[in-house]
């Protein structure tokens, strides 16, 4: 959205226990400077000794959400997080009077209807030998042992690939495969068309030969 529709009117509220737990904090703060109609609110709960956090503090409740998003009832609402958090957020917006047709939530706890009921564990490479992964954007080549995922190797090699659910569901770790092949067992986080174009999910892709990826 920042790339294709940067003038979009978005109110983004993110909640965490501590400032260091805020997911993608730096990226969100950058987008806040780039998107003129983005209203970014970060809310943290705890107040540890020596903490210099000067932003919003406390638990998410009806009064605080109304303060952070005064025009809540006129918006389309998207919610994601642990089940207990989503239950709380859903109750807040429902009690505030939001038409729940306009409320959407995503859970990492349940696979979508089109996903397999049981996640298939990919087999290691047929040879049973280590292969290599070249992260071309980072200029790093690292060995990959049988059974390791691209994401696991990237972390060991100090290559940063954004990831969230790490179960093939959310699509956060999607990267482009430039050469080689993988066994991938996802839970709906990538489309068949994207796989045909060469994209993989790093969290659930097991190389079965030397691999080059754009990361």
Image (cartoon, helix red, strand yellow):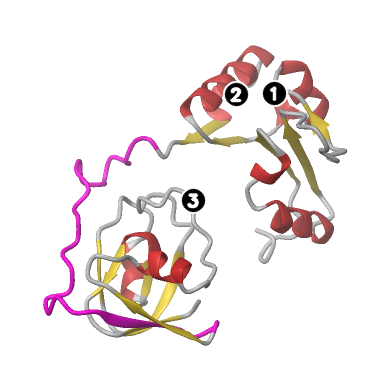
Q: Secondary structure at mark 1?
A: loop
Residue 177, image quadrant:
bottom left
The residue to which callout 2 is attached is: 89
The residue to which callout 1 is attached is: 60
How many neighbours does mark 1 have within 10 angstroms: few (below 14), some (14-19), or many (20 or more)?
Answer: some
Q: Secondary structure at mark 2?
A: helix
Question: Looking at the picture, how far across and down is residue 209, in whole percent?
Answer: 24, 82
The nearer-to-camera label among 1 and 2 is: 1
Question: Looking at the picture, how far across and down is residue 143, in whole percent?
Answer: 34, 80
Residue 116 magenta-highlighted:
yes
How many neighbours does mark 3 have within 10 angstroms: few (below 14), some (14-19), or many (20 or more)?
Answer: some
Whichever of callouts 1 and 2 sits on the residue coming sooner in the sequence is 1
Nearer-the-camera pick, 105 or 169: 169
For the record, the magenta segment spans 109-138
The residue to which callout 3 is attached is: 164
Disc number for residue 126: none
Task: Please name the predominant secondary structure of the magenta segment in the image.
Answer: loop
């Amino acid at each position: 959205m920042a790339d294709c529709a940067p003038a979009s009117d978005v109110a983004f509220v993110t909640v965490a226990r501590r400032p260091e737990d805020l997911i993608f904090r730096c990226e969100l703060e950058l987008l806040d400077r780039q998107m003129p109609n983005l209203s970014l609110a970060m809310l943290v709960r705890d107040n540890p000794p020596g903490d210099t956090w000067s932003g919003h503090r406390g638990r998410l409740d009806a009064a605080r959400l109304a303060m952070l998003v005064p025009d809540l009832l006129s918006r389309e609402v998207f919610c994601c997080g642990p089940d207990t958090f989503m239950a709380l957020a859903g109750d807040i917006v429902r009690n505030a009077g939001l038409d729940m047709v306009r409320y959407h939530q995503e859970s990492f706890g349940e696979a979508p209807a089109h996903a397999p009921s049981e996640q298939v564990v990919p087999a290691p490479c047929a040879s049973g030998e280590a292969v290599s992964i070249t992260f071309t954007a980072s200029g790093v080549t690292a060995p990959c042992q049988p059974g390791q995922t691209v994401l696991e190797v990237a972390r060991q090699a100090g290559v940063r690939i954004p990831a969230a659910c790490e179960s093939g569901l959310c699509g956060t770790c999607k990267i482009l495969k430039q050469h080689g092949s993988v066994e991938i067992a996802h839970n709906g986080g990538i489309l068949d068309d994207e796989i045909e174009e060469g994209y993989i999910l790093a969290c659930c892709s097991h190389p079965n030969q030397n691999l080059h990826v754009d990361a």
